[in-house]
Image: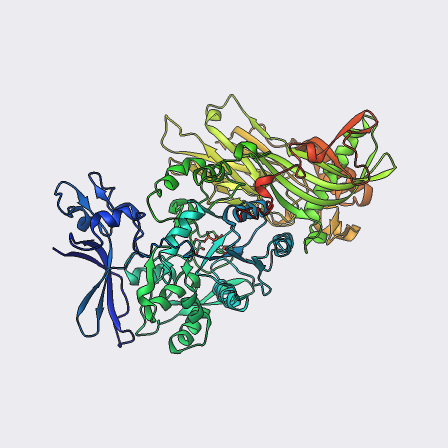
């Protein structure tokens, strides 16, 4: 009455490295066994390690859809004593060198003893500036019996600075003292992971699993269910395998190529042969490892580790293969569980655009951010042993994060102020590069002056002088503008901290006489276009002479025609055509971007981009290349202005043969524009500021400002001329207003939660 349907786990079989020659797990049915089908199903639904398909531990009339890998076997099984019902459970079978097969049902380690708890180290590997999302992640994960070890990319001083206070605030949080420039896919990622894991032993924390997570991961099940699952699976190591033919994986992954990480890039230098006698395995680099295994991989180098160290120092995306390969080839072989506890939002068509070419000599893929419409993907993991999902980015979509929190048991959302708001820092005065951020400081300085002009109309004198922070502000997943926190002198009397809210103006003109005009959905220029998320990361369109503008277009399908050709003309501030591009529009190309062939420095001023059908204008957009007020943090000199503000007109191709209708300036106008542009180059100091301000006021609208001052602690509103300032802490849009979800909460000593 014992049936076995096995799936090869792939423990290494060669050279007698292992005692266990092969290992199976599969479905188990035995009516007389203590682990009867029913028991198995009742016991929390996942009695055995290695069972990533919790939904397939069933006993009932409606088994869930079988997984691809063990589907057929499961479908055939019947519940003992009841042929109408189907049953499934799991077992492990190890084949030993003697050739004897030995059944070893993994005993469910469910214990009544409450002390049999599990302690987790969350190894957070962080990058970027999404501080409030990192806080939100920590708030969601935090329990006082777990630990947080945080590594921040050494180039991300903002995030590191802001997180440092956590070490003092919470006893179970440590930041990595040794930090690496962990480039995407780089060998340094593995180096960092191994160094961080080694450090865990120095800290003498008592832990059962280390789980690595990034700023874009989030739990999708309650921490209690993760704890319950892991407490039954102590000693196992969770990694996800590629699930395809090994040779194909090796090729796709570039494992047969030697890479060298140098100056924060992975350079491909040649072909290589992988060592013989080693089973190569890999897949995801999101893992949950046991202390025994971590102690082994970070400890003394035996022959296997010493060899793999050399291989993996020169391997692209090393963390996606290293742990898998060590597991397969070491005595830890049968602790391998093919499950990374994650669901990943892969949309390969969007995520595999070779977007990391500047960082790695390879075409790498990235998962997409979850959006509200991806909710079913998360919900479908309800019965699976997936405890985390990636990727989440509140600048792209925050609603889904809120929904996930509700799904995993958060009940206090209705009590939280600013739940739908999201703030993310763009610039901070303490950033290591802050003083030389000439473009952003020029831009922000000009906006604060614009605000002063507006206030002056109300008889309020506000002289801005130091930019502290610039923050981008979203509400209900819509970009609402930027906020500039700056110092100023109010009424020539006292210093205040002001936050100014502003937004870019829209610059799309449509020619309603053209029949294609209704097809134009987006026609816009900015920079830092993210192909994967199909959005500009430079939301405020802040562009300077050294920027690389990109045009994004989106068309509605053209009903009467399958394909159409359009022309794009780029007109510089003097009215000269700087570049011409063609769009070949078909159903696969309705949304796309164009990077014009323009040489830096770009001529400052207002640029125009026209969309044409033959010679007829359909749509026109404008963008601003802001002149720079400073160079490397110092006021621009005449000599520098001459270089930076004179453009690169002599690098343009000759487009005089292109004669679009109603687009180019006439000869007289053209001469005038040239003359103005020429004289603009000579502008420095106040004259330069005036020019910058006149340009900026056409491209940005100031929406309001609030005050935050320590010298006036009154709750009263602050008057200045006829203007009454709100306090920022009470101003909904202000980055200084309360944001409980994005701030580390207070520790509740009773529950151990934040
Ligand atoms: C993920 C996997 O990590 C990668 O191995 C796989 O090939 C694709 O899916 P992706 O989501 O693109 O990659 O990477 P991301 O989460 O942005 O970065 C991975 C880790 O590296 C994160 O912990 C991130 O914080 C860190 N990182 C990334 C840095 O520290 N610095 C960087 O410049 C980029």
Q: Is residue 578 left or right of residue 692?
A: left
Q: Is residue 371 left or right of residue 175?
A: left
> Is residue 13 depicted above or below 697 in this figure?
below
Residue sitting farthest toward the right? 493
How many numbered tags mark residues here? 0
* Residue 590 can be seen, yes or no: yes
> 297 or 266, which is in the foreground?
297
Residue sitting farthest toward the bottom? 303
> 423 or 451, which is in the foreground?
423
Quarter-wise, where is residue 494 in the image? top right
- Residue 675 in the image, given as x and y percentages of width and height: 74, 38
* Residue 656 can be seen, yes or no: no
Q: Residue at x 26, y 77 (%)?
A: 15
Quarter-wise, where is residue 443 in the image? top right
- Residue 646 in the image, given as x and y percentages of width and height: 70, 47
> Is residue 291 depicted above or below 215 in this figure?
below
> Is residue 49 depicted above or below 566 in this figure?
below
Residue sitting farthest toward the top? 513
**Quadrant of the frame with the N terminus:** bottom left
């Amino acid at each position: 009455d014992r049936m076995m349907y096995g799936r090869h786990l792939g423990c290494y079989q060669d050279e007698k490295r292992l005692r266990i020659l092969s290992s199976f797990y599969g479905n188990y049915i035995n009516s007389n066994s203590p682990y009867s089908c029913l028991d198995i199903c009742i016991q929390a639904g996942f009695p055995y390690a290695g069972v990533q398909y919790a939904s397939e531990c069933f006993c009932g009339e409606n088994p869930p859809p079988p997984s691809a890998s063990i589907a057929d076997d499961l479908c055939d099984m019947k519940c003992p004593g009841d042929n109408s019902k189907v049953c499934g459970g799991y077992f492990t079978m190890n084949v030993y060198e003697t050739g004897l097969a030995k059944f070893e049902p993994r005993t469910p380690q469910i214990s009544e003893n409450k002390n049999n708890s599990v302690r987790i180290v969350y190894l957070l590997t962080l990058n970027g500036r999404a501080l409030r999302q990192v806080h939100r992640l920590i708030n969601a994960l935090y329990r006082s019996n777990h630990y947080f070890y945080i590594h921040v990319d050494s180039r991300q001083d903002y995030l590191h600075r802001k997180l440092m206070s956590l070490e003092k605030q919470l006893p179970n949080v440590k930041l990595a003292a040794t930090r690496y420039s962990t480039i995407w896919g780089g060998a340094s990622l593995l180096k960092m992971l191994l160094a961080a894991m080694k450090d865990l032993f120095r800290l003498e924390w008592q832990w059962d699993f280390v789980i690595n997570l990034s700023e874009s991961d989030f739990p999708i099940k309650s921490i209690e269910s993760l704890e319950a699952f892991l407490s039954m699976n102590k000693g196992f190591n969770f990694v996800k395998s590629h699930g395809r033919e090994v040779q194909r994986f090796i090729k796709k992954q570039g494992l047969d190529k030697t890479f060298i990480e140098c100056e924060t890039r992975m350079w491909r230098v040649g072909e290589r042969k992988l060592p013989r006698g080693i089973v190569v395995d890999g897949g995801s680099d999101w893992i949950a490892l046991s202390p025994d295994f971590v102690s082994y991989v970070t400890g003394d180098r035996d022959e296997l580790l010493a060899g793999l160290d050399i291989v993996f120092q020169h391997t692209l995306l090393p963390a996606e293969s290293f742990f898998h390969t060590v597991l397969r080839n070491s005595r830890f072989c049968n602790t391998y569980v093919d499950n990374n506890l994650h669901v990943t939002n892969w949309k390969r068509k969007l995520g595999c655009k070779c977007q990391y070419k500047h960082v790695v000599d390879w075409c790498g893929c990235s998962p997409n951010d979850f959006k509200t419409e991806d909710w079913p993907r998360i919900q479908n993991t309800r019965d699976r042993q997936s405890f985390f999902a990636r990727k989440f980015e509140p600048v792209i979509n925050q609603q889904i994060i809120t929904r996930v929190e509700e799904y995993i048991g958060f009940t206090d959302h209705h009590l939280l102020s600013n739940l739908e708001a999201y703030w993310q820092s763009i610039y901070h005065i303490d950033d290591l590069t802050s003083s030389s951020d000439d473009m952003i400081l020029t831009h922000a300085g000009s906006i604060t002056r614009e605000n002063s002009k507006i206030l002056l109309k109300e008889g309020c004198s506000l002289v801005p002088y130091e930019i502290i922070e610039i923050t981008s502000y979203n509400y209900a997943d819509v970009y609402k503008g930027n906020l500039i926190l700056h110092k100023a002198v109010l009424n020539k009397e006292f210093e205040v901290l002001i936050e100014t809210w502003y937004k870019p103006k829209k610059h799309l003109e449509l020619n309603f006489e053209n029949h294609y005009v209704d097809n134009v959905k987006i026609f816009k220029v900015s920079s830092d276009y993210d192909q994967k998320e199909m959005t500009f990361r430079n939301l405020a369109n802040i562009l300077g002479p050294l920027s690389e503008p990109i045009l994004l277009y989106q068309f509605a399908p053209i009903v009467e025609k399958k394909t159409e050709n359009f022309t794009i003309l780029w007109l510089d501030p003097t009215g000269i055509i700087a570049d011409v591009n063609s769009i070949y529009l078909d159903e696969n190309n309705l949304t796309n971007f164009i990077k014009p062939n323009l040489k830096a420095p770009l001529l400052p001023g207002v640029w125009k981009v026209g969309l044409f059908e033959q010679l007829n204008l359909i749509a026109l957009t404008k963008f601003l290349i802001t002149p720079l007020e400073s160079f490397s943090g110092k006021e621009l000199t005449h000599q520098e202005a001459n270089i930076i503000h004179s453009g690169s007109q002599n690098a343009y191709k000759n487009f005089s043969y292109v004669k679009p209708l109603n687009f180019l300036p006439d000869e007289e106008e053209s001469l005038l524009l040239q003359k103005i542009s020429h004289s603009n180059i000579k502008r420095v100091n106040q004259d330069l500021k005036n020019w910058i301000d006149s340009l900026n006021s056409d491209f940005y609208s100031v929406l309001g400002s609030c005050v935050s001052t320590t010298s006036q602690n009154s709750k009263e509103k602050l008057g200045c001329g006829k203007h009454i300032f709100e306090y920022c802490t009470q101003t909904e849009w202000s980055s200084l207003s309360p944001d409980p979800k994005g701030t580390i909460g207070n520790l509740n000593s009773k529950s151990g939660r934040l």
